[in-house]
Amino acid sequence: MLIRHAQAADAPGDRERPLTPRGARNATAIGRWLESAGLVPDRVLVSPALRARQTWDRAAESLVPDLPPTVEERLYENTVESVLATITETAEDVQTLILVGHNPSVGQLSFDLDDGEGDQDAQRQLHAGFPAGAVALFEVGAPLGDLRPGAATLTRFEVPTA
C-alpha cells in the first residue's frame, strides 16, 4: 500500500510541518478504513517528515499500535527511485507493506507500478490525482524485492475522510 500523508499545515521548516486538525481526523480515518478492509501490515515504512509520521501514528491507533514503523530517510528524498528502492529491500516474509510518503513520488510510483489489469474505478481515481491522505492498494505476484514498473495490480484507491 502506498499512502500519501494527510493534509499538513505550514511550519518554518518543511520536515516540521504538522497535520492540520482535518489531516489528523483523516489520518485516523485511514486506520479505520484499513481495519474495516482487513488490511493489517507486517511492516510499515514512513518518511521522517513530521506529517508522515503523524499520519501513520493516527492510522495505527485503530489498527496495529504495537507495530513500530521504520522511519526511512530515503522516502523524504521524494523520488520514484528512492521510494522503489526502499520497497525492494523489504524482507521476503513480509506479505503486507505500508509505505507513508509524499507526492510526487508516491503518485508517480503508483502509475509506474500499475499493470493496467486492476480495478477500473481505482485506476480512474488514481488518474484524477493522488490527494493528501489517499491510499493505493496493490497486489504483487512476486517478492517485493523483484518489484518493478508494471508488475503490480491496482485493486483499490481510497481517500478515507472523517
Image (cartoon, helix red, strand yellow):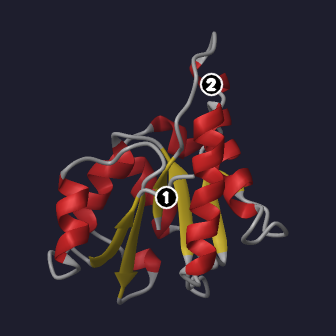
Residue 66: quarter of image: bottom right
Residue 151 higher or lower than 103, as above or below? below
Residue 143 higher or lower than 160, as above or below? below
> x, y percentage for residue 129?
25, 47
Q: Is residue 130 left or right of residue 62?
A: left
> x, y percentage for residue 1?
47, 68
Find the distance from the CA under tag 2 to the CA under tag 1: 21 Å
Residue 116: quarter of image: bottom left
Q: Is residue 153 left or right of residue 26?
A: left
Mark 2 or mark 1: which comes first in sequence?
2
> x, y percentage for residue 119?
23, 79
Which mark lies nearer to you, 2 or 1?
1
User: What label does residue 74 carry, if any?
Assistant: none
Residue at left offset 77%, top offset 61%:
61
User: What label does residue 160 carry, if any?
Assistant: 1
How many numbered badges does the structure rendering display? 2
State the SS at label 1: loop
Which residue in the protein does label 2 denote? 17
Residue at left offset 72%, top offset 59%:
69
Q: Which one is nearer the viewer's eye here, 64 or 82? A: 64
State the SS at label 2: loop
* Residue type, numbered disc 1: Pro
Residue at left offset 70%, top offset 43%:
54
* Residue type, numbered disc 2: Arg
Residue at the farthest front position: 162
Residue at the farthest top position: 12
Q: Can residue 149 be seen in this view?
A: no
